[in-house]
Amino acid sequence: MRNLLLFLLLSMSLYSGLAYSQNTESTLLEETAIKQLIAEFLVVRERNDEQALLALLTEDIDQLTSSGNLRSGRDRVSNGSLASTRNNSGTRTITVESIRFIKADVAIVNGLYDIVDRADGPDRHYLTSFVVVMEDERWKISAIRNMNPTQ
């Protein structure tokens, strides 16, 4: 009886370890896909590729810009983002600092958003947050929040 109990305890530990390992591996794959989504967002903006940008956004996306403007809906966010890229020179980068899964198909992405080498003014350094959701078996952007950090 004692051996059976010991065997059950060891089996449970092994299976829970395997489940954790698979969950961690799955999470890392999802984090990689989300980081690729954010990188693709910047690339298609830079290329001024409206169709590619629209494909990355949910229908009901909204964006709160660093100037305090709220854009609602895929067309307004796409048009505003592309116009901002065209009208404000510089190299844009987003450094993802954290990804927090709210549910398996919803995550909050926090990072640093920088626009450097601008011809029309000094470099800009913002904080950014994205809400991303799994839609049609692909991560898409559902909300964007850009803000000036406090000093």
Image (cartoon, grey):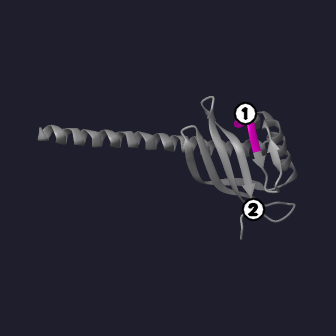
Q: Is residue 43 left or right of residue 82?
A: left
Distance from the alpha carbon under mark 1 to that under mark 2: 28 Å
Residue at (68% x, 41% y) in the render: 141
Is the magenta region chiefly helix, strand or loop?
strand
Residue at the disc numbered 2: 148
Amino acid type assigned to the residue bearing label 1 in the image: Ala
Query: Would residue 48 be visible to someone looking at this image?
Result: no
- The answer to whether residue 90 is above or below residue 44 is below
Q: Is residue 21 left or right of residue 14?
A: right
> Which quarter of the rendering shows the N terminus?
top left
User: Quadrant location of residue 95?
Assistant: bottom right
Please tell me the numbered disc located at residue 55: 1
User: Quadrant location of residue 128?
Assistant: bottom right
Magenta region:
55-62
Please tell me the numbered disc located at residue 77: none
Give the residue at the far bottom of this rendering: 151
Q: Is residue 131 magenta?
A: no
- Does dot 2 land on a helix, a strand or a loop? loop
Q: Earlier in the sequence, mark 1 or mark 2?
A: 1
Give the residue at the far top of this rendering: 136
Q: Can you give x and y, in whole percent of width and height, for residue 80 in the image?
A: 84, 45
Residue at (87% x, 61% y) in the render: 120
Amino acid type assigned to the residue bearing label 2 in the image: Asn
Residue at (48% x, 39% y) in the render: 26
- The answer to whether residue 38 is above or below residue 92 is above
Q: Can you give x and y, in whole percent of width and height, for residue 29 in the image?
A: 51, 41
Give the total number of marks visible in the rendering. Answer: 2
Q: Is residue 62 left or right of residue 10?
A: right
Along the viewing direction, whichever of 108 and 32 lies nearer the viewer:
108
Q: Are marks 1 and 2 in contact (CB under 8 Å)?
A: no
- The answer to whether residue 69 is above or below residue 7 is below
Q: Can you give x and y, in whole percent of width and height, for residue 14 in the image?
A: 29, 41
